[in-house]
Image: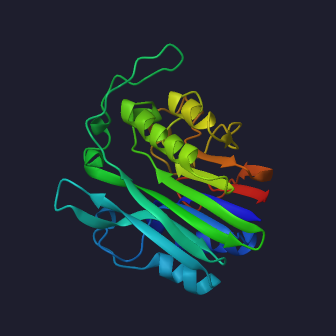
Amino acid sequence: MKLIHLNVESFKYFDALVDFLENEKPDILSLVEATDGTFLWSQGGEQRDYIGELSRKFSWNSVYHPTVFRNFWDYQIGFGAAVLSHFPISVENKQYFWEQQPTILPHDHIVFSDKPKYERYPHAWKLSLPFLITKIQTEQGTIRLLTAHFHVSYECLETLQIWQNAERVAEYVEGADNTPLIFTGDLNIRNESMAIKTLSEKMTQQSRDFTNTLTPSIHPVFQLNPSDPLRPIDHIFTKNVSVSDCAVREVVVSDHLPLVLDFSL
């Protein structure tokens, strides 16, 4: 079976994404920054149901969990986590990572930023990002799929909150039964981080050899620091799953690159 994880950047490259999906023919899509037609402040309030369009075009089932713009009106905005599949999907849990003022962590093995992320993202601290847990009934058995979006930090370096988010995911995995599990996410953190170490203690990191998951021609971080090529901030972890391949596809379908997991149960 094939799973694709992608931060779709509010489907800005929707037609290119559709072409890519037609070629890849995935069984499961795990998306963040997906939109379902509700109010979208990042695109001036466009109300196009891209998730519904994908579902209809490919005859997929779908589940959606929106982001909350917490400190304004406590208002649901139109990008969040989504899972799509031609297999039946059920929701096990919907949670949020609530953003607070970040605390930069000192650590011997990691270079941490000394700049608050608000210099780049003045509204990011107001976002409560989704953590979506679903179960998918495949022809080989049931999969528990965890889809997450961690808050961004300056130059994708580690904060206390990112580490705490990882601990929450790890605790959920530890408390779950032995159902085969896949965790995907735009975690906004690199392989050297304590957050990745925390997650790797509970699951197998399939993305550990990736050196970049961002689109060089599009993503602003390449303009921010073009001398730093190591930006593997999207990740896939598994537990009780047999993986034959996990790769990054070098295609322009978003400001992030799609991760493709080939697996069986």
Front one among 212 and 91? 91
Whether residue 50 appears in this view of the structure is yes
Q: In the image, is residue 27 above or below residue 198?
A: below
- Tell me what residue is drawn at x 48 percent, y 20 percent: 111
Quarter of the image with the C terminus in it: bottom right
The image shows residue 168 at horizontal and vertical percentages of 45, 42
Quarter of the image with the N terminus in it: bottom right
Q: How is the image coloured?
A: rainbow
Q: Give residue 258's quadrant in the image.
A: bottom right
The image shows residue 227 at horizontal and vertical percentages of 55, 28
The image shows residue 105 at horizontal and vertical percentages of 39, 22
Front one among 67 and 47? 67
Q: In the image, is residue 69 above or below residue 150?
A: below
- Tell me what residue is drawn at x 58 percent, y 30 percent: 197
- Tell me what residue is drawn at x 34 percent, y 78 percent: 47
Residue 112 appears left or right of 118: right
Whether residue 33 appears in this view of the structure is no
Residue positioned most to the right? 244
The image shows residue 113 at horizontal and vertical percentages of 39, 25
Q: Give residue 83's quadrant in the image.
A: bottom right
Front one among 95 and 72? 95
Residue 4 appears left or right of 97: right
Count every numbered label the image shows and give the total.
0
